[in-house]
């Protein structure tokens, strides 16, 4: 079986959907399913530096990735996704579909132009679609009248969480199967013996709440002596934000984009992950990524995160409250036996609910049923 994975974003820039797709492809490969990923790509050069202020992967993509165009930053849902809007991508998508002759297409955020809407227009095989986003999704007020009819070409709808299902169903009523995002789980992870550090993983998008963390940091640093490692956000943007907030950079190291292997190493060494997002999160992939590494989490009490967190994985704190965030981190780090119990519990939750092996089996059953 040959499955085409269609993504409206750029392979060059890290994000939850890109990570989801890459891990899914690896899990499907283990089941003997061949895939090709149709996605955007921003090669190295001055034009890319003008369009995108942050660093990314600008080299040649892997052989199973089919790049079809450059992306631009489009503010949406409190985030800054890199979406391919170039009309030149449309004939490239059509050419890829004709050349590859897929048995099934699996689209992610199918109502996002232009890659997904083009693929839906030219699809000549069954289509599966996964909906990731939650919130008002206001862009559909403009998109639905123009290409909303393409939803009728989708044979099986998936939502990664109840929040994502409710948001998609608000615009496009129908049946959505709930299949969560999987996560990478290393073979072993010991919650004990960790470095005195916490980790933040995320872009510098407004909804990720980095200003809340940086305002809370002086108290966290004073009370715990911990170090803060910031992963995913551009180091220059972190420095600019610290300057704007008149923040204290002591104990902070900004690492930028990391490979999966390097991110795993960071999470395995940290005492906790902190996730101070303000809202607009449909799932919380960074949370489950920490769970797999036996790393407990201090997260905002918001829709999406609330669906993933349990009493055995960490602490929830009010969103947008630096004092509450600092108190939560301090509480977790100060009680080492409890922190280790929560880390072990988080690992169990990841293995039981979010291992890619079981999720890939469910997807394979859907593909076979349609093909």
Image (tube, helix red, strand yellow):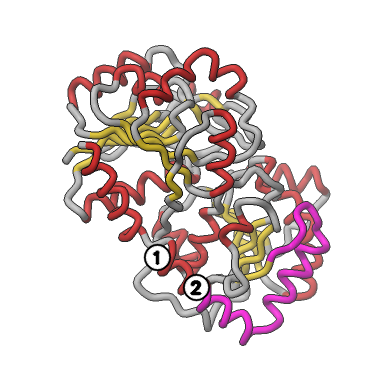
Q: Which of 264 and 237 is in front in this view?
A: 264
Residue 159: image location, x then y, percent: 47, 43
- Left or right of 288 in this view: 234: right
Residue 243, placed above or below residue 123: below
Instruction: Look at the numbered disc 1 and give the secondary structure of its residue.
Output: loop
Magenta region: 316-345
Q: Which residue is drawn at 81% across and 67% down?
A: 219
Of the 4 image quadrants, the one containing the C terminus is: top left
Q: Which of 356 and 223 is in front in this view?
A: 356
Instruction: Look at the numbered disc 2 and give the secondary structure of its residue.
Output: loop
Residue at the spot of label 1: 185
Point out the residue furthest to the front here. 174
Residue at the spot of label 2: 294
Q: Nearer the viewer, residue 67 or 16?
A: 16
Residue 233: image location, x then y, percent: 59, 46
Secondary structure predominantly adopted by residues drawn in magenta: helix
Residue 74: image location, x then y, percent: 58, 26
Q: Residue at x 60, y 34 (%)?
A: 80
Name which quarter of the figure residue 196 lies in.
bottom right
Name which quarter of the figure residue 117 lies in.
top left
Residue 229: image location, x then y, percent: 60, 61
Q: Is residue 325 magenta?
A: yes
Q: Pick whichever of labels 1 and 2 is earlier in the sequence.
A: 1
Of the 4 image quadrants, the one containing the N terminus is: top left
């Amino acid at each position: 079986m040959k499955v085409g994975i269609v993504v409206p974003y750029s392979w060059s820039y890290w994000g939850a959907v890109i990570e989801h797709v890459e891990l899914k492809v690896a899990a499907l490969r283990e089941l003997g399913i061949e895939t090709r990923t149709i996605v955007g790509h921003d090669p190295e050069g001055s034009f890319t530096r003008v369009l995108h202020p942050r660093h990314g992967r600008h080299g040649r993509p892997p052989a199973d990735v089919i790049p079809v165009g450059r992306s631009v930053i489009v503010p949406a849902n409190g985030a800054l996704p890199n979406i391919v809007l170039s009309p030149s991508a449309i004939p490239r998508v059509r050419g890829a579909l004709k050349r590859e002759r897929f048995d099934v297409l699996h689209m992610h955020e199918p109502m996002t132009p232009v890659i997904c809407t083009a693929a839906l227009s030219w699809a000549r095989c069954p289509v599966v679609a996964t909906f990731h986003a939650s919130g008002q999704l206001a862009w559909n007020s403009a998109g639905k009248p123009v290409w909303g009819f393409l939803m009728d070409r989708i044979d099986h709808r998936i939502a990664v969480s109840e929040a994502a299902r409710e948001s998609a169903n608000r615009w496009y009523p129908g049946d959505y199967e709930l299949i969560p995002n999987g996560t990478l789980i290393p073979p072993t992870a010991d919650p004990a013996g960790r470095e005195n550090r916490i980790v933040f993983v995320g872009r510098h998008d407004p909804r990720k709440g980095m200003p809340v963390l940086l305002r809370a940091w002086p108290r966290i640093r004073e009370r715990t002596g911990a170090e803060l490692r910031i992963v995913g956000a551009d180091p220059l943007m972190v420095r600019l934000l610290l300057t704007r907030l008149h923040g204290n950079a002591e104990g902070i190291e900004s690492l930028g984009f990391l490979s999966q292997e390097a991110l795993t190493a960071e999470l395995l060494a940290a005492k906790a992950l902190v996730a101070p997002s303000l809202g607009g999160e449909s799932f919380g992939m960074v949370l489950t990524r920490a769970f797999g590494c036996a790393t407990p989490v201090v997260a905002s009490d918001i829709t999406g995160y609330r669906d993933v967190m349990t009493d055995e994985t960490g602490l929830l704190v009010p969103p947008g409250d630096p004092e509450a965030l600092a108190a939560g981190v301090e509480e977790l780090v100060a009680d080492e036996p409890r922190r280790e119990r929560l880390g072990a519990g988080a690992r169990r939750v990841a293995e039981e609910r979010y291992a890619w092996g079981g999720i890939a089996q469910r997807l394979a059953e859907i593909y076979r049923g349609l093909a």
